[in-house]
Image: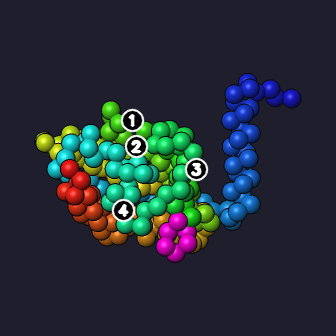
């Protein structure tokens, strides 16, 4: 019998359990992730902008954003859920939170639809900040695959990030 070191065995068991959980909720799909990245400028320093990309910070600029905190706050391992107006529930987990480096990363699961990563980077850009947002989504079924492809398509993604920029500019102007 093959013996694995404890840590390796624990990781293998958790991966197996996740595989069983996903297998029970969606048909098997071999799908490539869909990704897109966009950048924009904000006329405020990263120290002021970066907190707006936390679960609670987004309330200041993202219309309808009302996360339900499940654990923690904004640090690694914290979790929260959101509900889209169409009823879609998405669970988010903070996988990286580094204000000094201007990086935050989330893993997300949109129930019975898709899984993915969201990466936000904030870097100094003159007297303001350069923001880079990357979504990487993988469909869990045909519905999720269609959503991931449409969401990350250039035209949709660019329009969404433009809306983010406009909402952030407005929020920064109203709260000095």
Q: Secondary structure at mark 2?
A: strand
Name the outermost residue toward the left.
126
N-terminal label among 3 and 1: 3
The quarter of the image holding the N terminus is top right
Look at the image and give the residue range highlighted in magenta: 83-88
Residue 103 among those drawn in magenta: no
Q: Secondary structure at mark 3?
A: strand
N-terminal label among 3 and 4: 4
N-terminal label among 4 and 1: 4
| Residue, disc 1 | 98
Indicate the position of residue 88 as horizontal and vertical percent values. Answer: 55, 69
| Residue, disc 3 | 70
Would you place residue 74 above or below residue 56 in this image? above
Q: Secondary structure at mark 4?
A: loop
N-terminal label among 4 and 2: 4
Q: CA distance from mark 1 to mark 2?
A: 6 Å
| Residue, disc 4 | 62
Please tell me which residue lies in front, 5 or 14: 14
Q: Is residue 53 left or right of residue 149?
A: left
Q: For the point 48% across and 51% down, which residue is it?
A: 117
Let me know if residue 113 appears in the view: yes
Indicate the position of residue 77 as horizontal and vertical percent values. Answer: 54, 40
Question: Which of the two marks, 4 or 1, is nearer to us in this view?
Answer: 4
Q: Is residue 116 left or right of residue 152?
A: right
Residue 28's disc is: none
| Residue, disc 2 | 104
Q: CA distance from mark 3 to mark 1?
A: 20 Å
């Amino acid at each position: 019998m093959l013996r694995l070191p404890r840590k390796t065995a624990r990781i293998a068991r958790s991966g197996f359990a996740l595989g069983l959980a996903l297998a029970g909720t969606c048909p098997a799909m071999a799908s490539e992730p869909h990704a897109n990245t966009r950048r924009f400028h904000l006329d405020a320093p990263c120290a002021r902008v970066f907190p707006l990309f936390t679960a609670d910070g987004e309330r200041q600029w993202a219309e309808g954003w009302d996360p339900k905190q499940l654990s923690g706050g904004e640090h690694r391992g914290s979790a929260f859920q959101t509900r889209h107006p169409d009823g879609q529930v998405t669970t988010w987990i903070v996988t990286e939170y580094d204000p000094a480096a201007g990086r935050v990363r989330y893993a997300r699961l949109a129930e019975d639809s898709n899984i993915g990563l969201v990466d936000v980077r904030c870097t100094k850009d003159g007297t303001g900040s350069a923001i880079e947002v990357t979504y990487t989504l993988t469909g869990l079924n045909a519905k999720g695959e269609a959503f991931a492809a449409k969401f990350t398509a250039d035209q949709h993604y660019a329009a969404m990030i433009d809306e983010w920029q406009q909402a952030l500019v407005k929020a920064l102007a109203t709260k000095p």
